Amino acid sequence: NRGIVYFDLKNYTQAINDFNKAIELNPQFVKAYYNRGVAYNSLGMYEQALNDLNIAIELNPQDATVCHTRGITYVNSGNYQKAIIDLQKAIELDPGYAEAYYNTGLVYQRIGDSENALVYFNKASELSRK
C-alpha cells in the first residue's frame, strides 16, 4: 500500500522500491508487478514496464486492466500493432470496458485508420452513456 501512496505522490522511484520489496516477499504478487510496471511506464522506462506487465499477464491472463495497460505502454513506446492486439484483448475480456474502446480508437486514429477509429470511438461513447 505504501508503494501506491508513493505512486500517487508521483514519487515513482520510491514506489518502485516498495514494489520490489513486495515482489521479493511474494514473487506471485500480480498487483506488485502491475503497479511497478505502471510506475516504470510513468518514468518512460517502457522496456521495464513491459517486462513487468508481461509477468502480470502470465500470472493472471484474464485481467483486462493489465492487458489494457500493456496496450497503453505499447502505444507510449510506439508499437501500435501490439497496442491494438492488447487493447482488443482487454475488450474481449471485458466487453464493457469503454476506456479500452476509446484508446483503441486513438491508436487507429494515430495510424491513420479513421474508419476503425470511428467504430471504436462510437462504441466507447455508447458504453459511456450506459
Image: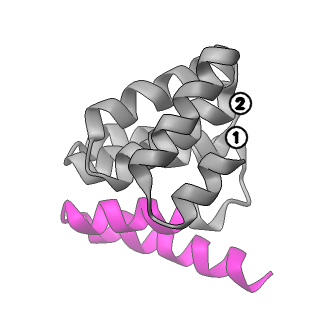
Give the residue type at disc 1.
Leu
Residue at 23% x, 42% y is 79
Q: Quadrant of residue 117?
A: bottom left
Q: Which mark is residue 19?
A: none
Q: Is disc 1 in contact with disc 2, using a CB cutoff of under 8 Å?
A: yes
Q: Main secondary structure of the magenta part?
A: helix
Which residue is denoted by mark 2 in the rendering?
62
Q: Quadrant of residue 42?
A: bottom left
Q: Residue furthest bottom?
A: 129
Marks 1/2: CA distance?
7 Å
Q: Earlier in the sequence, mark 1 or mark 2?
A: 2
Residue 5, image x, y percentages: 63, 59
**Which region shows up in magenta?**
101-130
107 part of magenta stretch: yes
Give the residue type at disc 2.
Gln
Front position in the image: 53 or 98: 53
Which residue is denoted by mark 1 in the rendering?
93
94 part of magenta stretch: no
- Between marks 1 and 2 in the image, the one whose residue lies nearer the viewer: 2
Q: Quadrant of residue 48?
A: top left
Q: Could you tell me if residue 88 is visible in this image?
A: no
Front position in the image: 116 or 20: 20
Residue at 71% x, 30% y is 62
Residue at 27% x, 32% y is 47
